[in-house]
Amino acid sequence: MRKIILVILIFTLLTGCNVFPAGKSTLTSAEMATRVALLLTAMPTATGGPQMPTESLDLLTPTEPTGPMQGEIGVIASPTVEETLSSPTPDETTMALLKATPTPPISMPSATPTATVAPTATTTPTGPLKSPAPTNNAAADPRTLLPAPTWTDLMDTGSNWPTGSDSYTSIDFKDGFMVLSGMTKDNGWRLAINDVDNAYFETTAKFGSICKGMDRWGMMIRVPDRASANKGYWFNITCDGKYAFQKWNATPPDGESSVTNIIAWSSNNNIKTGADAVNRLGILAKGGQFTLYINGVQVDKAADNSFVSGGFGVLVGAKETNNFTIYVDELSYWMNPNM
């Protein structure tokens, strides 16, 4: 440090700076040497030393620095240029892609709905069906012998029936008819809202405009449990002129099938066959005795004691025609008839 101060003093004296007070004459070489020696002698040391002489040196007070601070290690400068990252310029192909209209997002398909087979086109009746006259023995027609029915439904509304579609049937009420379609090759049915035991039941209905072979419709009676409808009797006719009286039991005892032919399929000339044919079916049920009528004519008798009372309704079987449809005009019953 002393060397630095000495250099500064010598440089100042040589350049003629006004270190000493104004008014004194210019120093000779000998006087200058004496002053330097005096200054060096007055510098403090680590162990102490002579004090500055009382004679004032009249040194000028240094001015405030106007540049960067200096020290033993030199100038400390802050950077003045910030490093900037620049993005590469896209080529023409990239620019074309950026300007292109974005492809809209691909919509996920909704869940695939269950396929529904449209019903086969049929001819809708436009008014009440005219029941065929009996071909013989008209005097024995129950309809002519009995008074007004105990209960009747002219199918103007569906108030007496469960509506909508299920796996076996589709039902609707239109223009004064129950429009009933079979959805499977097996029999399906709709039951009315009440139970009956001993009665004469009668239904008038029309085959649809497409009617083949073993396509069928009929009545179901004495269903012990209308909610499950797993038991009862069937009286049905086919488009090609057959009838059968059967016992239905979805949980048969060992050795029996679910469908038992009490009267097996048999041909009968009283059945009006083919598309759009109108037929009137009747069953007289008394205890375990059953008498069957087709278009007012008694065609058969049967006996069975499996079911004594229960629900009743209309059945349909689309054995050969998809969505085979019938039009039901009326269903009635007479309680405990005098027959």
Image: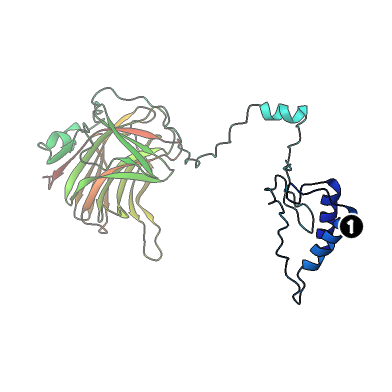
Q: Quadrant of the C terminus?
A: top left
Q: In which quarter of the image is the N terminus?
A: bottom right
In terms of image quadrants, where is residue 42?
bottom right
Residue 1 visible in the displayed image: no
Question: Mark 1 — residue?
Answer: 30
Element at label 1 = helix
In terms of image quadrants, where is residue 243?
top left
Q: How crowded is mark 1: few (under 14 residues within 10 Å), some or many (20 or more)?
A: few
The vertical placement of 255 against 15, above or below, is: below
At 72% across and 45% down in the image, what residue appears?
67
**Relative horizontal placement of residue 68, taking residue 14 as reference (left or right):** left
Residue 35 visible in the displayed image: yes
> How many numbered discs, if any?
1
The vertical placement of 256 against 122, above or below, is: below
Instruction: Name the one closer to the observer, 288 or 156.
Output: 156
In terms of image quadrants, where is residue 280?
top left
Percent position of residue 278, x then y: 30, 29
Percent position of residue 266, x then y: 37, 43
The vertical placement of 268 against 122, above or below, is: below
**Relative horizontal placement of residue 306, taking residue 88 as reference (left or right):** left
Percent position of residue 66, x then y: 70, 44
Instruction: Name the one closer to the observer, 293 or 101.
Output: 101
Percent position of residue 210, x then y: 42, 29
Q: What kind of residue is marked 1?
A: Ala
